[in-house]
Image: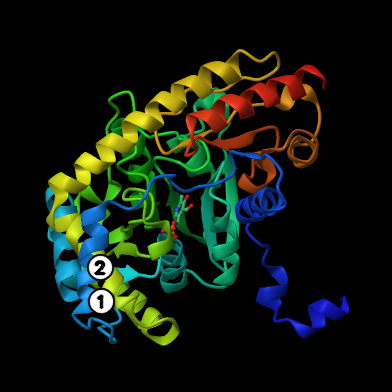
Amino acid sequence: MSTENRILSAVAANVSPSPTLAVDSKAKALKAAGEDVCGFGSGEPDFDTPEFIKEACAKALAEGQTKYIPAAGLPALREALASKYVSENGITGLEPVNVVVSPGGKYSCFLAIQATCGPGDEVIIPAPYWVSYPEMAKLAGAEPKVIFAGDEQGFKITAGQLREAITDRSRMLILNSPSNPTGAIYDREEMEAIMEVVLEHGLYVMSDEIYEYLLYDDVTHHSPASFSAEAADKVITVAGFSKTYSMTGWRLGTLVASAPVAKAVASIQSQTTSNATTFAQYGALAALERSDDAMAAVAEMLTHFDRRRLFLLDSLNAIDGVSCPRAQGAFYLFPNVSSFGIGTDDLADRLLDDHKVAVVPGSGFGAEGYIRLSYATSDEVIEKGVARFQEFCANL
Ligand SMILES: Cc1ncc(COP(=O)(O)O)c(C=O)c1O
């Protein structure tokens, strides 16, 4: 064991840093040094938080909402979230006790896994996956078990693949629809087939629905917890305010689960972070209470995302050797660049160093041969960046 490993816990020695944040930091450092970088790395909307949400937060701050509140969240916000999940997502029988507000969707995922998985358990993770899932499974002492679904199957696992992957040690399946990094969305039939296998084997599901409102081409989002009472008992639905309302820096996540799981999650949170920032939760409450205004802001953001998505999709597919599926959710495209025959870590490094274009290599998403481009950036950056990428590919 190296000296470094000896000074760390086994868990810390085993965890990797986030590759998406690493690309973003490198691109930001180059920009700060005066370089003209076209960044496709960032996973955050390039719009400001809607004004009325900021005002509600500022009002709470001015009124002295600066103290501890219950660890599981502001009671009114938990109540509003329970109502939202009943009326919009169709999950029945929810009460505020089923809801936890956390410091970020990322922490909600961490808590969901911590509360239900441990040493000896396997967490089934469909790849391409969001970079943090395998690391979070490892942080809980569990073992990630990856099932791969490439572009030829729309980046979606089948019920048959899931059945084959299940062992005596399987404990949880992670679903993420719409997906980061692929933008893929499971339709109802596909998800029901998966849930049938899940329930047959008594697995938990962590359904990460953080991109639930970022949909294109008239597709519909489905929450697996809404399929039956049995499903509601086994599915832990995680989400947050970051992506929908451009609130990435606010650090507010949500979690909805059966009462015993939600209670355990709240206990872990109470012993680790306590409540998410009090006055920030008032801003989130305004987003739910004034849902018409919030959805108008989301619709406006979506018109920009959709235009950029289609432009980037066409531009990428026009490049010899690049093949990009039509993603219908989130704000990412995940083209296949395997025909160039070079590793995507290397490709992304060269693209950033020589052409000042930041993309995230597929390796971090468990999908070598692909790269992720976020179109949550301006039209100008997209046009300039894709032209540089085209030039780069022509010289490969
Ligand atoms: C799939 C997915 N889940 C969860 C998160 C966490 O978001 P946040 O912690 O900002 O709420 C992200 C952010 O990139 C994500 O892409």
Classify residue 365 by image quadrant. Answer: top right
Question: How dense is the environment of label 2, judged by Cα within 10 Å: few (below 14), some, or many (20 and up)?
Answer: many
At 42% from the left and 57% from the top, the residue drawn is: 248
Q: Is residue 89 visible?
A: no
Q: Is residue 182 left or right of residue 138?
A: left
Q: Nearer the viewer, residue 202 or 209?
A: 209
Q: Is mark 1 within 8 Å of ligand 1?
A: no
Name the spot of residue 396 as percent of width and height, x first: 82, 22
**Between residues 28 and 192, which one lies in front from this camera angle?**
28
The CA distance from mark 1 to mark 2 is 6 Å
Q: Quadrant of ligand 1?
A: bottom left
Which residue in the rendered view is the most extreme toward the right?
A: 2
Which label is found at residue 195? none
Q: What is the total number of numbered labels drawn onto the structure image?
A: 2
Residue 312 against residue 230 in the figure, above or below: above
Residue 310 at x, y percent in the picture: 45, 21
CB-based contact (under 8 Å), mark 1 and mark 2: yes
Q: Residue 19: image x %, image y %?
A: 65, 53
**Residue count near mark 1 (Cα–Cα under 10 Å), binned few <14, some 14–19, many ≥20:** some
Query: Which label was assigned to residue 57?
Result: 2
Q: Quadrant of residue 309?
A: top left
Instruction: List the single residue furthest toward the front.
Output: 34
Instruction: Point out residue 124 in the picture as x, y percentages from the top left corner.
Output: 52, 52
Vertical placement of residue 342 versus 147, above or below: above
Q: In the rendered structure, find residue 61 and report the number of the disc placed on it.
A: 1
Quick one: 36 or 236, which is closer to the camera?
A: 36
- Quadrant occupied by the N terminus: bottom right
User: Callout 1, which amino acid?
Assistant: Leu
**With respect to residue 127, does 305 lie above or below?**
above
**Residue at image x 33%, y 79%?**
275
SS assignment at label 1:
helix
